Image (cartoon, rainbow, N blue to C red):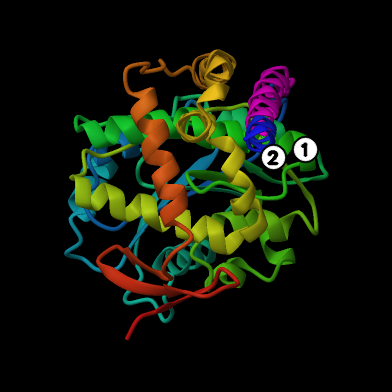
Amino acid sequence: MGSGVFIASLVLLGCWVYCLLAIAAAVRHSRQERPKPLENSLAISVLKPLAGLDEGLEGNLRSYFEQDYQPFELLFAVRCENDPAVPVVRRLMQHYPAVPCKLIFTGEPPYAHAKVFSLKCMLDEAQYDLIAMGDSDVRVAPDFCRSLAAEFQDEQLGLVTCPYRAVAGKSVWSRLEAVGMNTDFHAGLFTAVMMEGTKFAVGPTIVARRSAIEALGGIERVKDYLAEDYMLGRLAADHADVRLSPYVVEHRIGSERIGQNFAHRLRWARSSRCSRPWGYVGQFFTHPMPIQLLVTLVWPATWPLMGVTVALRAVSAWVVSKRILGARVRWELLPWQDMLGFGFWIAGFFGNSIHWRGRRYLLNRDGTMELAS
């Protein structure tokens, strides 16, 4: 019994150390110096792959049309004319005739990753050498282009990826997911940057020099990977500097039903396991509250340690979510999200198939994917 309590205490100590690292990493990120405004503007091509009518899509796309910056252009890509996103784009093009804009119909992709094919089609049409790639569920402020372009005054910088504030929809599952993104995900993100530098990218928003994309073999180099954003940053880091920007964008989460929500959260877990297998195992220590509860159930003598765990979890959640991302912490949902997140982490170890955009894919051990027959 004594040795069991000792081992359990060491496990909890690992969780405490992680919480302290997450707090330090978030504070370190908040002290990152913002670049000075550009004297000469860098032209930007903004690429938006679209598929279907996401909740809040028009507002998300409108935020890009309303950029306080010149020169920039917008490119949108869909598979076919009857995609529900097409009327939204055309309506905005009519409302903002002064904004240079193209709508591209890609047809069916020749490989499994339709998003990468859309990006490739838009890159072929883009005029400028600074490329901003953003998901359809992202919303930005009018200073987005100006702020991100300013970072590229550093000639060594090849790629920048942005942290994001998750904005929940109406469903409870959406609110729980937003709590997890604004606390757990970004705590791990900031900690990874502090410990090993930025050797990855996150999907909602990536800005890169065209030369950096070409140096890794073009955007199609990542066409076989489900986590194409992560791989794009990882490969780009071999050729140029990669940085996590201080600029925060908004990730608008739709009000999905429980089945849809759980399916894509499981997809992320399995994708993360395949992309960084040992890092995924290490995520055990990023779940302090569920681990504390399990340890206390098995070894009740450890219950006095719960106060330390609760305090560190609360402080790390507040610093990451409120101070860095500007998102209110939903304290009433945090314990439930902690348990749910731990469950998805466990589930991520099992299975190699995912459902994405109405299709089923198989994940390989190296992070690549293929369309299931």
Answer yes or no: do the residues labelled 2 and 1 have beta carbons within 8 Å? yes
Left or right? Give the position of 56 relative to 199.
left
Residue in view at x 53 percent, y 68 percent: 225
**In the rendered image, which residue does mark 2 sit on?**
192
**Disc 2 residue crowd, few under 14, some 14–19, many 20+, Cα 10 Å:** some
Report the amino acid beneath label 1: Met
The correct choice, above or below, for 258 with respect to 150 in the image is below
Residue at 37% across, 32% down: 337
What secondary structure predominates along the stretch shown in magenta?
helix
Work out which residue is located at the far bottom of the displayed protein and give it: 373
Q: Is residue 260 left or right of residue 224?
A: left
In reply to whether residue 19 is colored magenta, the answer given is yes
112 above or below 155? below
* Front in this rendered view, residue 114 or 296: 296
Q: In the rendered view, would you say 48 is above or below 70? A: below
What is the CA distance from the residue labelled 2 to the residue labelled 1? 5 Å
Of residues 243 and 100, the one nearer the viewer is 243
Q: Is any atom of residue 85 visible in this view?
A: yes
Q: Where is residue 91 in the image (x, y as percent from the top left)?
A: 20, 43
Q: Is mark 1 on a helix, strand or loop?
A: helix
Pinpoint residue 323: horizontal percent, then vertical percent: 55, 14
Q: Mark 1 points at which residue?
A: 195
Horizontal arrangement in the rendering, residue 75 relative to residue 151 (left or right): left
Q: What's the amino acid at mark 2? A: Ala
Residue 275 among magenta residues: no
Could you tell me which residue is drawn at 69 percent across and 65 percent down? 214
Image location of residue 251, percent across then percent down: 40, 35
Q: What stretch is highlighted in magenta?
A: 12-35
Quadrant that contains the N terminus? top right
Q: Is residue 67 left or right of residue 276?
A: left
Which quadrant holds residue 51? bottom left
